[in-house]
Amino acid sequence: MGIAWSHTYAAFGGRDLTGRWGVTALSFFAREGKSKIRSRCLRVAQGVTFAAGCSLLFAGAAYAQSPTNMFDPAATPAHSIFDLSMLVLGITLAIFLIVGGMLLYALIRFRQRPEDSSREPAQIYGSTQIELSWTVIPVLIVVMLFLTTTRVIMGTQGISKPDSTMDVTVIGHQFWWEYRYPKLGIVTANELHIPVSNPKSPLPTYLTMSSADVDHSFWVPRLAGKTDLIPNRVNTMWIDPPDAGLYLGQCAQYCGTQHAKMLLRVYAQSPADFAVWVSQQKKPAQTDFSGNPTAAEGQTVFMHNACINCHTISGTISNGRFGPDLTHLASRDTLASGAIPNNVENLRKWINEPDSIKPGSLMPPMHLNDHDLNAVTAYLAQLR
Amino acid sequence: MMRDASTIPIDAGAIGEPAETPWTLPYRGTVGMACLILAEAAIFIIFVVAYIYYIGKSLSGPTPAQVLELPIFGTVCLLSSSLTVHFAVSALRKGKMRQCTLQLAATVLLGSIFLVTTAREWYHLIHDEGLTIQTNLFGTTYYSLVGLHATHVVVGLTMLSLVLGCSLFGLVKEEHSEKLEVLSLYWHFVDAVWVVVFLVVYVLGR
Amino acid sequence: MSTTTAIEGIDETQASLPGRPPMNVILEWLTTVDHKKIGLMYIGYALIFLLVAGAQAMVMRIQLAVPNNHFVSPQVFNRLFTMHGTTMVFFVGMPILFGFGNYLVPLMIGARDMAFPRLNAFSFWISAFAGLMLYFSYFGANGLSGAGSAPDVGWFAYAPLTARVFSPGHSTDYWTLAIFLSGVGSIGTALNIVTTTICMRCKGMKMTRMPLLVWLYLVMSSLVFVTISPLTAAQIMLTLDRYLGSHFFDTQAGGSAVLWMHFFWIFGHPEVYVLVLPAFAFVNEIVPVFSRKAIFGYPAMVAASVGIGFISLSVWAHHMFTVGMGAGANTFFVFATMVISVPTGIKIFNWLATIWGGKVIFASPMMFCVGFLFQFLIAGLTGIMLSAAPFDWQLGNSYFVVAHFHYVLVGAILFAIFAAFYYWYPKITGRMMSEKLARWHFWLFIIGFHLTFDFMHIPGLLGMPRRIYTYEAGRGWGTLNMIVGIGAVFQAAGLLVFVYNLVRSYYKGKEAGHDPWDAWTLEWSTPSPPPDYNFAIPPSVKSRRPLWDLKHPEDPDADYE
């Protein structure tokens, strides 16, 4: 019986080189021997280009001329995230180089060579010492990383609201942003104006956020991480850019057809400029168009159409809340939440056929005749 | 010749050795049912979590304290049916067919009574208290949780009735006791879920 | 050898007779309860959907290759990413992995079939039906209001976007129902795998002697029970909301959108472990054979796998760091997510130690495993980056996340699946796949993979969110998206070479024999392909590598473990 066994096992591919299948198995791999050296070179090449590529990647990211580059922080939350991210990137890069390097080394050093004997290598089943060390070291790295991360979480989310803040209520809609300044009595849309925050006497802007319909997310990478706007829930975040400028971003939680064009524009302004903006926004809408008959007619057309059901123009009968506040529409740089520049031509196009600019947006085409369309456009273009 | 040597018994070293301890593995049915119970338990847990999460959050409408009464009678019936099904299984193991049939019938009866009490309770809630699944968060979570449980009771009763019918025709034998035990496991699970639902909805939630 | 000749007669089954009428063959496959045929049907079905979902990805990449593109409308694009994600997870990933599990688990434990063969067949057919139903939505979802087509709510279908008012028509319902049914199939198959593993091992195969593949499938299937069920529950709730007017996720009535997120991610996170554990399983079997060494640290591998299974149930809200859960909750989930990197790292180190001191043979299965090892390492590291919640406040919902999870799904899981194909194809069909075509496949695909998914990280770092059908010029995203798209072309080419190899080798591949790779687990002791009954006489084993013991009687594993 024992002899039968050894025949049997040899017959189906065992170590015995004279066994039929053994020859097949070994010769199969021996045929590959010529490409072994090529294989080794390719493997090294792969590893090297990969490492080079990775460094380029992050270098590229850091220096790219992008207005939404998270590695170009411009406010405290973004700065603290940036510092944490550098630490995390450093640790992960080190781990990659060490482990990846050892892997590469092992694959090259221990590859099968044609001159190898047919003996199987020493079978090592484990080593408690080694396994313990590579459990303990990662645990220590995790602990360190965890503590550092917690510190940043506490520093951003965990701090209490300071006394002097600029408060803005942000309400997300499909597919635009509503901004209300409760202490200033201002309502506007799509372009957020905030004062800069001087590090010596900080004035951070606190955003209190919710949604009127579905989930959205407020993400301006250079200022802070993103925070979601969720219906029936209030979230808060704060930003404090010290430098004046325009900071870009967009909605970062899929909210429907035009999620892609729900863009964010944050204007950080010097105290003087901000004060000018505030005083302008506080004024009710211009209603006297004695010098501009087209605009005056446009105002009439507007007030007699369904426009008033969705939009608010303060000081008039138009007080809808479904669409953006238009009181100072002409003071904005863009229309349709950043989708197009704000000029007369675009405004006319938007009112006539919103789907041509933002297909799927919730503004219906108003089906005005050309005359009325021109009038309304002229009217809205006057609302500074 | 490709398809030559067929599967060769792999028995390295076993020839000539003394007989080892017998190789027994658990019964497939029990393990399978345990897996199913685990999955179903996870579904119920989510509904229970939703119930607990929404306690006190309804914007309007009747509250649990206003409309719910402890379903003592139904609960006693359902829990006793676990006992009777257990007796059915042990009777079958001992080969006592009549006893088994009787206990199965008792189980089906008790389970049906539970369903009737639930139905009556729902009738009262809908017609007298105006509470439906649409009314408020309480209505939503109450009907879905109790309803999901009742669905499982219906499935269990169907299976038990099938076995009862088979045993009435004399088709159930002693060798089927393992299978009946697997079914009884499901029934015990349904009862255990009711204990949780009872505590969460009628005790904690009120 | 009188024993051999007597047994030979059993090998003659109906299936092996030549010239069977096609109708018989079709009927046999439609009504089979044999785990091998069902496994192959799962795999074939998944491959078809892989090509479909891959085509969807191609269209998306074309649309995004330049800013302000008009290749497809936003409505079409939104359906594309929803269908791509849903298809890949539920109708490619799950079936293909269940298919391999179905085929291999009984063979590896010396059993003749699964514990519940008819349940096995039912699970396959209900999953198959579910996939067809999802795609039927393109035609059938119009509903009374004329709205709807394929679902367009994203594969995670956040509430309240899925409410009747925001998603009219039936497209969302097709999503719900298709996944619900596929979940039923998944639970059925998982039940089968667990029961088979516990109750049908051959003599001598204690749990501690099972191949690691079997262990990993056991953990994966156990995870399925507590993973799929929360999604099933949430979908029942969503359907009740949509049709019976309940208020589970109705924010107007006090319901919570965040509750859906919790339920979805309690499913969603362990789900990705359900997908990755079988990938680990394949690598656990292939790397030792092609390093000619036993796997290093078998007990640690088992412990790490079980540990990963358990911990994965506690990390779900790292998908919700931006939802405003509060510092305490965020901190907990940061901790749990970072902790899971420890057993995962242990696995990588064990693979490294298996290769170390071995004799590495770069045959096609091993090439893909090498790709897996590097890529899974990187994917894990970007995962650690995402686990640092503040960093995630920037990176979350951006293309960085998309790049990370594709690195896991494609770079790790798909590569492991390719390795599994090349490794077990000889066993399944009796023929070897072409090594030359395999190399073409490998190099085309890996170049494409890195072009696409390495560069995809950068737009995320530069502020590009996901699920947008177009983007502004001047953000610095255009060139990068173009490169990403070019990589997709290479991957498509590699995939086509692979499919060609699969088909061609069936007819023209070299005869494989029982054991072309000189491997050590039980499936290599059967003929290729195995007969319907797998083993004429059920085997009896004394160690983890029964065939090693037979081939090395002077140095059996049984002495060491």
Image: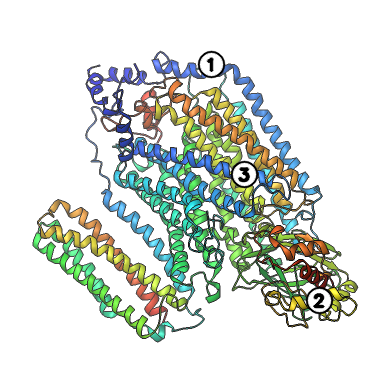
Pinpoint residue A380: horizontal percent, then vertical percent.
Answer: 80, 72
Q: Crowding near pointer 1: few (<14 within 10 Å), some, many (20+)?
A: few
Q: Determine which of the numbered discs, if any, sits on residue C153 in the image.
A: none
The tag earlier along the polypeptide, 2 or 1, is: 1
Which part of the image, by quadrant, shows the C terminus of chain C?
top left
Q: Which residue is mark 3?
A: C59
In the image, A119 versus B33, the foreground residue is: B33
> At numbered mark 1, what does the secondary structure look like: helix, strand or loop?
helix
From the top left corner, tell me how far across and down residue C558 is, in percent: 37, 32
Give left or right: position of C394 versus C137. Answer: right
Which of B88/C530 is in front?
C530
The residue under label 1 is A31
Q: Chain of mark 3?
A: C
Q: Residue at x 31, y 23 (%)?
A: C19
Tell me if residue C560 comes above or below residue A64 in the rendering. Answer: above
The reply to whether residue A295 is visible in this rendering is yes
**Residue A318 coordinates in the image, percent (x, y):** 72, 80
User: Taking C9 as reference, is C415 above or below it?
Assistant: below
